Amino acid sequence: MLIGPTEFLRIAVDPLRLAILGRAAVAPVDAEALAAELGEDPRRVRREAGRLVEGGLLGRDLRLDKAALRRIAQELPQAAPADPALLSGPWTPEEARQLAQFFSGSRLVSLPATHAKRRLVLERLVQEFEPGLRYDEREVNSILQVFYPDHTTLRRYLVDEGLLTRAEGVYWRTGGRVEPPPVEGP
């Protein structure tokens, strides 16, 4: 049985099945050992592993079928339009159009190569930080990971551009727009 992205999500939202898939990614699943580790009934672990085999996510050897995951990933839509909430704020219509080019949903798909466009994306990201609040590095990373997997690069760019300031492991917003967008007249 071949499953698609929606069916995969339905399967993967179950914590036990997710644990089985995670274990199967590195080694064959030992149902008894995993059950003991998770405090689960071994019969339930074997039953869920069997369902994952039937669904084509695990091979008969109880290893993750990486080719099945690649196939599911290829079925995913390549790009979703940028989340409208992401584009609301102090942006001109042209800036909002430019921002939309770099986001799919609420995820940043790539960092712009040109400084002006990269600055615009960074100004959008710094909107996630409340002026006057202090954030430790873990909080900054957590906020930025929502948008882009390389949160370290984003954090460095935000500091380099003067949008965030860092001292003694604490960050705070020191730049970015806080006023409404400029009014474009006729």
Image (tube, rainbow, N blue to C red):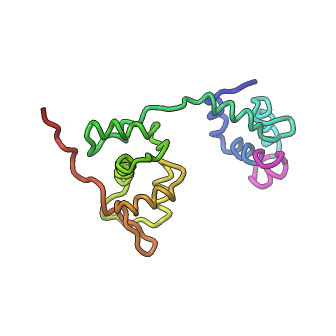
Q: Nearer the viewer, residue 48 or 75?
A: 75
Quadrant of residue 58 in the image? top right
Q: Quick check: 73 left or right of 79?
A: right
Image coords of residue 83 (percent x, y):
40, 37
Q: How many marks?
A: 0
Quadrant of residue 60 in the image? top right
Q: Residue furthest bottom?
A: 168
Residue name at image x 79 percent, y 43 percent: 45
Image coords of residue 66 (percent x, y):
74, 38
Image coords of residue 114 (percent x, y):
40, 47
The N terminus sits in image quarter: top right
Q: Residue furthest front?
A: 114
Q: Residue furthest top?
A: 1
Q: Is residue 175 above or below residue 40?
A: below
The C terminus sits in image quarter: top left
Q: Quick check: 159 left or right of 79?
A: left
Determine if the magenta segment contains residue 35: yes
Q: Is residue 101 above or below residue 152?
A: above
Residue name at image x 27 percent, y 36 percent: 93
Image coords of residue 130 (percent x, y):
33, 58
Q: Nearer the viewer, residue 106 or 40?
A: 106
Residue name at image x 83 percent, y 52 percent: 33
Q: Which residues are magenta?
A: 24-41
Q: Residue furthest right?
A: 61
